[in-house]
Image (cartoon, helix red, strand yellow):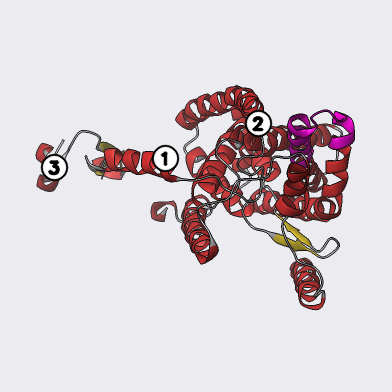
Amino acid sequence: MKKAIVAGSVILVLAIILGSVILNTKAEWSGVDETVVKKFAEEAGRPPAESLIRGDALLFFFLIAGAIGGFIAGYSFRGLFPPEGRISNPSNV
Amino acid sequence: MYLPKKYSSQSLKPGDKMSIRFLERGTATAFIQKGPPRMLIPALTTAAVLIVLASGPAHAMHISEGILPVPWALFWFALSTPFLILGLRNLNARSKSEPHLKAMVALVGSAVFIISCMPIPVPTAGTCSHPCGTGMAAILIGPTLTVLVASVALVLQALFLAHGGLTTLGADIFSMGVAGAFTGYGVFFLLRKLGLSWFVAAFAAGLISDWATYGATSLALAAALHSDGSFSTMFWSIIVAFVPTQVPLGILEGFITAGAYSFIHTRRPEYLGMLAKGEAR
């Protein structure tokens, strides 16, 4: 029951976010780096400098970083939280 | 002791580590952990130097490259460095007596890295922002080690993801690592001392650490950019600008923190005891 409530809540939150992204066509969904930090920096005469990593190259690096980060997290996770069967039989750990 | 021929001294090179695990009935197993190949460290060093020299200013989340004047950039580096040194010393000291610590630090570090470069749409504001994960990290591995993992995450993001900047690294480490970690840790232990449940304490740690991070970001920006205007006016203007995005995101971060703590509390509560022992040193 508790798991169902947690799963339902997560799905509900994701549905609200996804729905608002799809339905709210006027919003630009830019990050606070642009809407807050960049805005105040430009007003103060210190705009952020341009990046050398642009376009889809940035997406590529994010994908690679996510994959490497996910691998390290998963590898460490399995070492710290082995499956139940391995915990009950220490010789397998 | 008998050593199999394939593990003869000729196969061991400087940097290799050998450990022996004694089993029942007088048997033992030898493990050889191969050290890095001879060319690996110079190659990685060269690559790192080339990347640093070739990388241009970045322009993205955290505080972007070029926004902070040099004196302020140096000031935030100076403020963050002692915490970083403390984190390194703590890691060395604790890893000798806690065999699971390094794996835990790696897990939490990669979680902080992933969480802090994940833009999440906030329906109430029509913008995106990222949680920080440092409140969660602080109550799992301690605040000084959190500064360390946040620094590693921020360096990688600045170098490879155009996410933050190298000159603004000190300010980003201070806001995300120092302010986020120590506030989250303090809130968690204060609420536990007051007798609140660990779920409520973990939720509050995640929530307040997120807000503290963006509060510290506002402080760094206002201090460097207020020029002839009023510091407090600019500080509160930036805080107010963050509110529509960071209030809901802070609540989400509270749930992420409480969920992570709940999982470990249920599965391997002994890992949570590591923190109490380690940070007391």
Q: Which residue has dot 2 on it?
A: B69
Badge 3 element: helix
Tell me if label 3 and label 1 are in contact, CB under 8 Å.
Answer: no
Figure quadrant of the C terminus of chain B: top right
Task: Bin the neighbour count of mark 1 within 10 Å (Cα to Cα): few under 14, some 14-19, many 20 and up.
Answer: few
Residue A25 lies left or right of residue A88; in this view the side is right
In front of the other: B197 or B155 = B155
Distance from label 3 to label 1 (Cα)?
38 Å
Extent of the magenta region: B212-234
As for residue B97 lying within the magenta part, the answer is no
Three-letter amino acid code of the residue under disc 2:
Pro
The residue wearing badge 3 is B11
Q: Residue B177: percent from the left, percent from the top?
A: 65, 36
Chain of the residue where label 1 is placed in the rendered structure: B
Mark yes or no: residue B148 visible.
yes
**Sequence-earlier tag: 2 or 1:** 1
- Residue labelled with disc 1: B53
Quarter of the image where the N terminus of chain B is located: top left
Amino acid marked by disc 3: Ser
Q: Position of residue B126 (x, y in %)?
A: 81, 64
Q: Earlier in the sequence, mark 3 or mark 2?
A: 3
Mark 1 residue type:
Leu
- Picture disc at residue A20: none
